[in-house]
Amino acid sequence: MTGMNENPLDLLPEVLLAASAVTGLLLGAWLPRSRQWLTGALTGAACTAGIVAAALAAADPVETAFGGSLALDTLTATGRIVILAATLLVLALAMPRMHADPRETEFYVLLQLASAGALMMAGAQDLLLLAAGYLLASVPAYALAGFRKDGPGTEAALKYYVIGALLGVLMLAGITVLLAAGRATSYPALRTELAEAPAGLVAAGTLALLAGLLFKAGGVPGHFWVPDAVQGSPAPVAAFLTTIPKIGALVAFYRLAVVPLADVDLPWADLVAVLSVASMTLGNLAAFFQQDVKRLLAYSTISQVGYLLLPVAVAGRTDLDQEALLYYLAAYALTNLGAFAVVCALPDAHTIDDYRGLARTHPALLGSLVVCLLGLVGTPPTAVFFAKLEAFSAAFDGGYAWLAVVAAVNTVASLFYYLRWIAPAVLARRPDSHAGTTSRSAAVVAYGAATGSVVLGLLAGMVLDVLGGPLAG
């Protein structure tokens, strides 16, 4: 039985973000508008320090903290590092746009709080902590979606909030039902109790709980907010919404599958497989003829959830599931943020036609775009290629060969809409005037993310070796 451990250092990455958010809010009240960037610098320092703290903690023995509600294992450590690194990239995309904005400090504070919520979801070993992380990841994100206060932004925030509130209440109801069925909220206790609880009660509670997690991940059936929220939000916010909450939600989803639901006599793995197919197929089909690039990437992120659910569907059935999921999350975060960085670098280019002739005007940016878009397809030697290979292998090894085949077919199909974006940028002779203005800082992020995607792919074997390990429980 785990004793109470209230060492604040176990929550150091989360504490750093929260402290930086509070400090930045106080500083923002006194700093002149031209120096609000200092709060952004503080945010960057907190994220960097959090990455270092998480990396050092990863070498410690697996344990739980705070009465067993927080897991300190490979899942938590990797989730922390990927989330904080992704937050740094989003910060780099946002700071030039937000410079001297009247609400610059508020943006950085909201960004940190939402990221802290994703961190809590990734490490939660208790349903109550998971619910708290969900709320912390959601409420600041609603404000970020409507940060511009214009028509599209207001619509984005409203749709995001309404669906989030609905599925959030459903998630809380599911937690209540599971508490009634298992007489506990701790994952290890639920694993024992739910195996003997009434199947109907467990099924109802699990379905309601998963609805909230799928909302945060942007997967079917909680995906309805994604296209409008991403299209109406500022590009850095869209990059955030499609990346960071997804990481926390999918890590939490996987932990639920391997701990409290592991011994439940319900076909939850088949349900996850169906949700995987629905997400990847719907996302790909809806993206086929999109003209707005942010909306195209929004449907792309829905399809990526389908591939990311492959290791979750076979959780506990193979030794490849955990490392496949964690490596895919890191690869996806880097590649997806690289694609959004190109969008941020060309703020006046909103549609595919606006990228015509990009090869002549900005060849380096085009190179980054090609690497990231083909990377999302799963083209070697990018990281997503090896991530998909590992995820497909996990599905085969876990007895879901049919799911891997469906995912492979969807991967081939997704090439169509990515090439619809790449082809006019490469082949068109007449450059489009909309692609003329560039953001140098966002371009640097795009170059770095594209390079990082290739490097992470080349180091796949080494990285995968460190992503295995026992879970806290």
Image (tube, grey):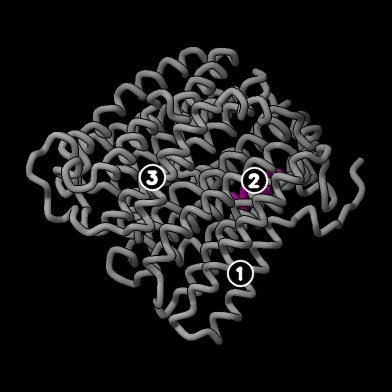
In x, y percent, where is residue 241?
A: 45, 52
10 Å crowding of disc 1: few (<14), some (14-19), many (20+)? many
Instruction: Report if residue 173 is visible in the image.
Output: yes
**Closer to the N terminus: mark 2 or mark 1?**
1
Asked which quadrant contains residue 145, the reply is bottom left
Question: How much space separates mark 3 and mark 1, taking CA atoms?
Answer: 29 Å
The boundaries of the magenta stretch are 171-178
Asked which quadrant contains residue 327, the reply is top right
Q: Which residue is mark 3?
A: 447
As shown in the figure, which amino acid type bears the numbered disc 3?
Answer: Tyr
Locate the C terminus and report the quarter of the image it occupies: top right
Q: Which residue is mark 1?
A: 21
* 31 relative to 220, above or below: below
Question: How much space separates mark 3 and mark 2, taking CA atoms?
Answer: 29 Å
| Residue lying at 81% horizontally and 59% vertically, measured from the top left | 8
Report if residue 49 lies within the magenta region: no
Q: Which residue is mark 2?
A: 122
* 165 relative to 30, above or below: above
Report if residue 177 lies within the magenta region: yes
In x, y percent, where is residue 404?
A: 46, 17
| Helix, strand or loop under label 3 | helix
As shown in the figure, which amino acid type bears the numbered disc 2?
Answer: Ala
In x, y percent, where is residue 174?
A: 62, 46
10 Å crowding of disc 3: few (<14), some (14-19), many (20+)? many
| Helix, strand or loop under label 2 | helix
In front here: 441 or 202? 441
Asked which quadrant contains residue 61, the reply is top right
Give the foreground label among 3 and 2: 3
Instruction: Report if residue 271 is visible in the image.
Output: no
